[in-house]
């Protein structure tokens, strides 16, 4: 039998949520990165027009959707993929957590992921009884590694892997005979040089893999760039043989993206203007919150891309969480992202302009 799963970590936030709620002006929750801006109208219209969805949808996605995904990879990621080398998924979290199962991993095999990472990578290993290994250095990946996750830009610390780092990771994964998957859903949000001007590279970038996608997958979500978290709209592309494997298992498991969501995705992937607008919103919020954090005595590490600020003042993260709660701000402790970030907290930029401004004001008032 599978070992018991750990408690859901966010349940430990209850007392800090209660403290923040006592603030006279109310709590400002910057701990969860759930989009709050409107979904694009064209996407909502496409969803509404497709609601007569009486037939079962195709697990592989409709041809028009696969073509839209492949076209998006070419335009936005510089990656040439055949339409049969992509697959829609029901959001990206289910794919991350289920990937070891979908690939047939089990006991005696290892899943590798970043030292500071979203917990779903480790949970995917736990679900199949595989070893969960947190290691950034490819030379430290064990010989029994069968799946490697890289996350660039990363959640929570916003770091970006350049072409050289991605190439080294792919080369090591291939030496081990492991699949390597890049979780890249924040790739449109680069803030600091060079990523404020240069595209953030994909693991499928020709500079990384040439024209050989063997053993390599790229995972992407429209939750953040298009505010479609509630739609569960994501996809994976790469090695055609791996896509076929994922497709076969997903067919047996009944993992089908709803037809109206497929229509909405086609609309979203074909419209880049709304993505630029959303990027501008997040940049403006970051420009307000980051200096306020620094004025309050916090150092922001990484965070050159993505939707979070990764901050520390050199004390245990729970102490910082408590201090934020006293001024009515809820943040996420670094402990939730592995054993290697005990002094950092994560603040999300996915709050309204008004809430970000209010949080900055409270931080400035609390500055030493």
Image (cartoon, rainbow, N blue to C red):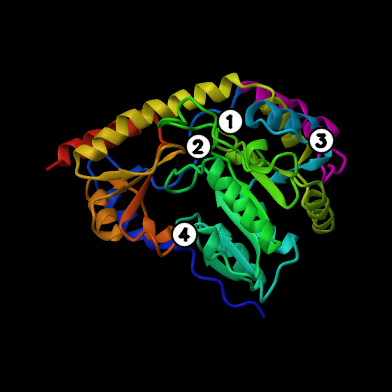
The residue wearing badge 2 is: 35
* In front: label 4 or label 1: 4
Task: Say which element carries label 1.
Answer: loop
- The picture quadrant where one finds residue 228 is top right
Cα distance between the residues tagged 4 and 3: 34 Å
Residue 153 pos. (x, y %): 50, 42
Please give the name of the residue rendered at 54% of the width and 62% of the height, measured from the top-left corner.
Answer: 139
Decide if residue 326 is in sight here.
Answer: yes
Ranked by sequence position, the earlier of labels 1 and 3 is: 3
Residue furthest toward the right? 55
Residue 346 in the image: above or below residue 147: above
Q: Crowding near pointer 3: few (<14 within 10 Å), some, many (20+)? A: some
Cα distance between the residues tagged 4 and 2: 26 Å
Are dots 4 and 1 in contact, CB under 8 Å?
no
The residue wearing badge 3 is: 83
Magenta part of the chain: 41-66
Q: Quadrant of the N terminus?
A: bottom right
Residue 301 in the image: above or below residue 97: above
The residue wearing badge 1 is: 226
Task: Say which element carries label 3.
Answer: helix
Residue furthest toward the left? 368
The residue wearing badge 4 is: 115
Ranked by sequence position, the earlier of labels 2 and 3 is: 2
Cα distance between the residues tagged 4 and 1: 28 Å
Cα distance between the residues tagged 2 and 3: 29 Å
Ranked by sequence position, the earlier of labels 2 and 1 is: 2
């Amino acid at each position: 039998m599978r070992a018991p799963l750990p408690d859901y970590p966010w349940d430990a936030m209850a007392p800090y949520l209660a403290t923040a709620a006592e603030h006279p002006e109310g709590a400002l929750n910057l701990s969860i990165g759930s989009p709050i801006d409107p979904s694009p109208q064209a996407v909502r219209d496409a969803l509404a027009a497709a609601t007569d969805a009486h037939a079962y949808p195709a697990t592989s996605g409709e041809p028009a959707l696969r073509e839209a995904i492949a076209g998006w990879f070419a335009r936005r990621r510089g990656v040439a993929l055949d339409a049969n080398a992509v697959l829609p998924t029901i959001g990206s979290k289910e794919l991350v957590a289920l990937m070891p199962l979908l690939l047939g991993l089990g006991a005696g095999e290892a899943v590798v992921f970043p030292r500071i990472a979203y917990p779903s990578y480790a949970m995917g290993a736990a679900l199949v009884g595989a070893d969960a290994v947190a290691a950034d250095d490819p030379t430290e990946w064990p010989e029994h590694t069968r799946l490697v996750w890289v996350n660039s830009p990363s959640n929570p610390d916003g770091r970006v892997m350049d072409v050289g780092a991605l190439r080294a990771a792919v080369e090591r994964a291939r030496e081990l005979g492991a699949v390597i998957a890049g979780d890249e859903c924040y790739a449109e949000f680069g803030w600091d040089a060079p990523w404020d001007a240069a595209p953030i590279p994909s693991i499928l970038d020709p500079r990384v893999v040439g024209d050989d996608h063997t053993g390599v997958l790229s995972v992407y979500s429209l939750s953040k760039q298009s505010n479609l978290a509630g739609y569960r709209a994501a996809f994976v592309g790469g090695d055609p043989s791996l896509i076929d494997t994922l497709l076969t298992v997903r067919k047996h498991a009944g993992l089908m993206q709803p037809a109206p969501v497929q229509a909405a995705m086609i609309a979203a992937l074909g419209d880049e203007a709304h993505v630029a607008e959303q990027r501008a919103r997040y940049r403006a919020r970051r420009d307000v919150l980051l200096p306020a954090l620094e004025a309050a005595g916090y150092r922001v590490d990484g965070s050159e891309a993505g939707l979070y600020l990764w901050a520390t003042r050199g004390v245990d993260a729970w102490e910082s969480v408590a201090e934020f709660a006293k001024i009515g701000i809820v943040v996420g402790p670094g402990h939730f992202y592995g054993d290697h970030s005990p002094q950092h907290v994560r603040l999300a930029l996915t709050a309204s302009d008004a809430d970000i401004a209010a949080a900055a004001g409270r931080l400035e008032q609390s500055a030493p």
